[in-house]
Image: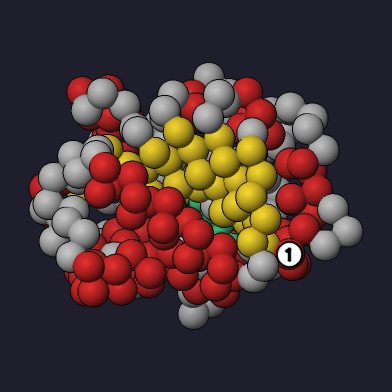
Amino acid sequence: MKLIKAKDYEDLSKLAATYFIKKIQYSPAMTIGLATGSTPEGMYRYLVKDYKENHTSYRNITTFNLDEYIGLDGSNNNSYRFFMNNHLFNHIDIEKSNVHIPCGTSKDSLAECATYDQLIKEHGGIDLQLLGIGGNGHIGFNEPGSSFQSRTRIVELTDKTRRDNARFFNNPEEVPTEAITMGMGTILESKEILMLISGEGKREAARMLLSGNVNEDFPASALHKHANAIVIADEAALTDV
Ligand code: GLP
């Protein structure tokens, strides 16, 4: 796992966007894995800026998002589909049929999970997967204890994750209790992984990750097992680490 130190959130966002843009320009039909949360918002802002100024095309790009809340459909402004449309997809030339996000309102969520993994396989896997990190080390919605072999599945969110994400909702009780997440095994099969860690709120998570201990109780530590994982972290996240 390679660590790149960024000065601050803007620097981290710019570095991550530049990394993605170069890859997309070199491989315009690649399959990318995308993440939600506040951390990648800055990177998406830079991708949109680059699209407007330099016209990097997403027409042949396929995307797979990590996760979605169960019970929220794409018109709900807390759904991850809404987030992605709002921050990225509505502003670039991506074909909506090439965008994949687990459906949180499927009548058959189990089938939805199996189909999602199958679709990723049919696309030859994910070339470059973007990740954030939860305060408890979760990636996607793979909470502590998730098997490193797990596939896309339904998960129960921990109280900590629901509390951390409550800031986006009008009322903490509205935070769904379950989600569909790409599995750890699914994520680890990505050819390349780029994780972003920003802010002092993520210091403990950064410290745990950089300690080098690999343990299913800290899902992000699986990156140490990956042959091609890069972490970009800013100074605020790395202070005293
Ligand atoms: C959610 C998402 C994760 C994300 C995490 C951290 O739980 N499922 O993919 O990494 O939040 O979000 P933030 O970047 O807002 O701290």
Residue 161 placement (x, y as % from top left): 62, 55
Would residue 104 appear left or right of 154 to someone viewing this image? left
The colour scheme of the drawn protein is: secondary structure
Front-lying residue, 107 or 218: 218
Look at mark 1 in the image and give the residue it sits on: 235
Would residue 239 appear left or right of 175 to someone viewing this image? right
Give the residue displayed 48% in from the left and 65% down from the top. Answer: 14
Give the residue displayed 77% in from the left and 41% down from the top. Answer: 210
Give the residue displayed 64% in from the left and 61% down from the top. Answer: 6
Front-lying residue, 158 or 14: 14
Residue that lies at the very extreme toward the top in this rendered image: 149
**Is residue 199 visible to the viewer in this orientation of the structure?**
yes
Would residue 228 appear left or right of 138 to someone viewing this image? left
Would residue 34 appear left or right of 62 to someone viewing this image? right
Q: Looking at the rendering, which quadrant does residue 102 occupy? A: top left
Residue that lies at the very extreme toward the bottom in this rendered image: 170
Residue 137 placement (x, y as % from top left): 67, 45
Crowd around label 1: few <14 · some 14–19 · many ≥20 (10 Å): some
Give the residue displayed 35% in from the left and 33% down from the top. Answer: 127
Residue 169 placement (x, y as % from top left): 49, 74
What residue type is disc 1 on? Answer: Glu
Image quadrant of ligand 1 equals bottom right
Q: Looking at the rendering, which quadrant does residue 227 occupy? A: top right
Front-lying residue, 111 or 124: 124
Against 107, residue 85 (above or below) is: below
**Is residue 166 visible to the viewer in this orientation of the structure?**
no
- SS at circle 1: helix
